[in-house]
Each structure stands twice: as structure tokens, then as C-alpha cells.
Amino acid sequence: MNTPTHSIPSLRDKVAPEEWAVRVDLAACYRLVAHYGWEDLVFTHITARVPGTEDQFLINPYGMFFDEITASSLVKIDLQGNKLEDSPFPVNPAGFVIHSAIHAARHDARCVLHTHTLNGVAVSTQRAGLLPISQHAISVLASLGYHDFEGPALRDDEKPRLVADLGDKTSLVLKNHGLLTVGETVADAFVAMYYLETSCAIQVRAQSGGGELIPVPKEVIESAYAQVVAATGRRGSRGLLVWPGLLRRLDRLDPSYRA
């Protein structure tokens, strides 16, 4: 697709203010995923529900790199991955299988973020999964599920098992595949992924040292997580704390995601 980013007409005055705000946050999330080195060329997705709807979602224009995505270039689709509005860009309906399953089952999961990072895939190949060896892992382990590998997650018949394995949790390790987080906001999903990805990176580095690892006892994990919840309020409130700063960082680097 040869349509340059800067030639896409702005949708700011053509959509509701609530939708525009979500578009800006989702475009920012794509840029941040690229900034932190979590992208896999164009082959993962981040989706967000259009405010006020149950069956409309925003997704990346397929073929555009994450550091090129703007609020106006995001494509509006239905639960089957079909485009609902004209766009010069295609979408990848097959890549929406995971997202559509979760959005349909979890109405609180307004944003679904999926990655294929080196650290995340490395941990997803380990039988023991994410180990309780770091402070970062404490909050992740309290709301983490696992889903067995069934192929590249392109079949509709896998959806019920995927949904069941996620349950009411925030994070999911897709074995031999990658990582996934959900959130009531884009910010919540991003921060959940930050902690999941960082926990995986710490684990891989610790294992590479070759020494004996020190597991945190289960009772300490439970107590520490309770303290985190008490200190920060609702489970996703860290997103509220850090998101404005992340947007300021993006604005300093390249504010074009707001276009």
C-alpha cells in the first residue's frame, strides 16, 4: 500500500469527540509499542472498542508500520473484521480472531493488546511460564492466564478456549506464541503489557546468568499485591498515573500520531 501517512484526511471533525479521544490514545499506543521495540513488523494488533458501541472497533491499517499510525488512519471494523467505513488501507480479518473473541466475551476489555516480543515468546515456550522471581512479576502473576498453542490463532473454533483461559484476568501468555493484555482503557492495557513484558525480560536475563534463581514465596506475592491494590486503587489505575507522561514523551518525539 503506497498511501503516505500524511495524505490521510483528518477525521477529527467527522467522528464524535469520544471516538476521537480513543483514536488518539490507540494511535499513541501503537507508537509506544514501536518505541519500546515490541512490534513484529506489521503482524500484531492492538484494538479498541468505539465508545458507545458493542460491535465496532478500531484497528491498525494493515501494512502500515506501528510508528506510522495516526488517529485518522485507524480503521473501523465490526466483530467479523469487516470495514465499516471507507479506508484506503486493508485490514487483516484473520488477525482479528483473537481480539474479536475477547471483545465479544469481555465488555470491560475495551482495549486488547497482543505482541510477539522476543522476551514474551521466550517465556511462552517455558513449561513453568512466568516465574515469581521479580517485583515486577508480582502484580502480573495475580491476574495471569495461559493458553495452549493451537496454531497461529486464525480459527473461530479456538475462540471459546481462548476466552475461557483468559477468564476475568488482565494478562494472558499464549504458549509458543506471545503475550496479550486487556484493559478498560488503552492506557490500562499498555501498562499491563509493560509489566508483563518487563517481567519476561527480567526472567530471560536472570536465566541467562546461569545461577540459581530465588523464587518469591506465594504468601509474599499475595501480600505485596494486596499492598499495591491498596496503594493505587483499582487494578488498572497505574494507567491513569503514567499515560499523560507517555503522551508528553510522544509529543516530544513525534506528535504526528494525533493527526
Image (spheres, rainbow, N blue to C red):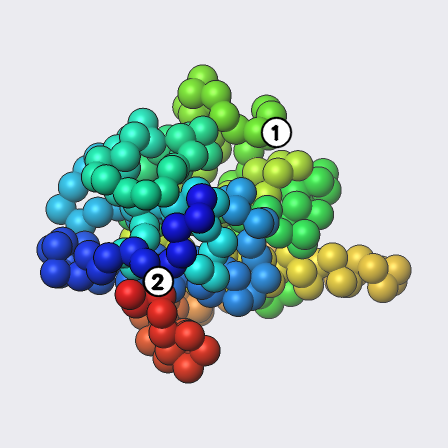
Whole-percent x and y of residue 188?
37, 59
- Rate crowding at label 2 as few (under 14), some (14 to 19) or many (20 or more) other CA atoms within 10 Å: few
| Label disc, if present, on residue 149 of the rendered structure | 1
Whole-percent x and y of residue 125?
71, 40
Q: Is residue 169 above or below residue 221?
A: above
Residue at horizontal 83 percent and vertical 59 percent from the top: 208
Q: Give the labeled residue for mark 2.
A: 6
**Left or right, residue 206 beside residue 144:** right
Q: Is residue 156 above or below residue 11?
A: above
Residue at horizontal 62 percent and vertical 38 percent from the top: 177
Whole-percent x and y of residue 147?
55, 33
Q: Quadrant of residue 86?
A: top left
Of the residues shown, which amino acid type is indicated by label 1?
Phe
**Left or right, residue 72 beside residue 12:** right
Q: Is residue 8 above or below residue 239?
A: above
Residue 92 in sight: yes
Q: Secondary structure beneath disc 1?
A: loop
Q: Give whichever of discs 1 and 2 has the lower sequence position.
A: 2
- Placement of the N terminus among the 4 image quadrants: top left
Residue in front for this viewpoint, 35 or 161: 35
Q: Quadrant of residue 45?
A: top left
Number of the front mark, 1 or 2: 2
Of the residues shown, which amino acid type is indicated by label 2?
His
Whole-percent x and y of residue 209?
85, 64
User: How far apart are labels 1 and 2 at the CA level?
Assistant: 39 Å
- Placement of the C terminus among the 4 image quadrants: bottom left
